[in-house]
Image (cartoon, rainbow, N blue to C red):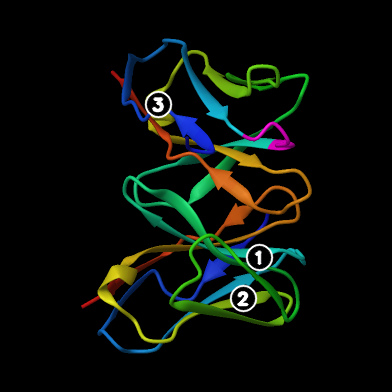
Amino acid sequence: DVKVTQSSRYLVKRTGEKVFLECVQDMDHENMFWYRQDPGLGLRLIYFSYDVKMKEKGDIPEGYSVSREKKERFSLILESASTNQTSMYLCASGDYEQYFGPGTRLTVT
Amino acid sequence: RKEVEQDPGPFNVPEGATVAFNCTYSNSASQSFFWYRQDCRKEPKLLMSVYSSGNEDGRFTAQLNRASQYISLLIRDSKLSDSATYLCVVTASGTYKYIFGTGTRLKVLA
């Protein structure tokens, strides 16, 4: 079974803090993805990575950066958290079908 | 026009009923299609890929109509446990990017 894990299920941060969300997959997939999901807007792609140290912007990259130093790990960074980044963050990996982690519900106050 | 459109529902059906959802997509170059299921406050889980010839997995049947640019999901003999949101996913040719619909909510009633 594919396993995608995320570092936290729930996170509360203050405005202006730097936030790190980590994702690890155990299936040797080349591709990894970060999404956010908001009511009425569905899942939107923030960034994806198709190889170590390679990344591409998704549809809503503003305010985010990513890091992929090892194949199994893909990190999402909020450089200076803002209240409009309160959301559910989902990591996925997969080279055809995508498999999701359990999500991190981030609240920025 | 949205790239992937779904009727948000909810579809309320009794146990044992057959229910079908459609999903339309705008990019005729789209090559891969999937249905995901998402339970409340959980992550999406792959239900099935959709192949050109159509495919079936137990009570679930998926179809692709390229001419009219839609995919469908049919659920037979609905169970209470089928209650969830069903997400339609489309990829464009030559990309890894998924484009999600906003989902169709299904409630199966006892």
Please identify the residue farthest to the left as the structure is shown: A109
Residue assigned mark 1: A32
Q: Which mark is residue B7?
A: 3
Q: Is residue A59 left or right of residue A86?
A: right
Main SS of the magenta part reads loop
Q: Quadrant of residue B80?
A: top left
Q: Is residue A20 above or below residue B106?
A: below
Q: Residue shown at 70%/17% (left/top)?
A: B67
Three-letter code, disc 3: Asp
Three-letter code, disc 2: Phe
Q: Nearer the viewer, residue B52 or B62?
A: B52
Q: Residue shown at 60%/63% (left/top)?
A: A33
Circle 1: element type:
strand
The residue mark sitting in front, 1 or 3, is 3
Residue assigned mark 2: A74
Q: Quadrant of residue B78?
A: top left
Residue stretch rendered in magenta on the structure: B27-32
As measured in the structure, the alpha-carbon distance from the residue carrying label 1 to the one carrying label 3 is 29 Å
Q: Nearer the viewer, residue B20 or A47?
A: A47
- Labels 1 & 3 near each other (Cβ < 8 A): no
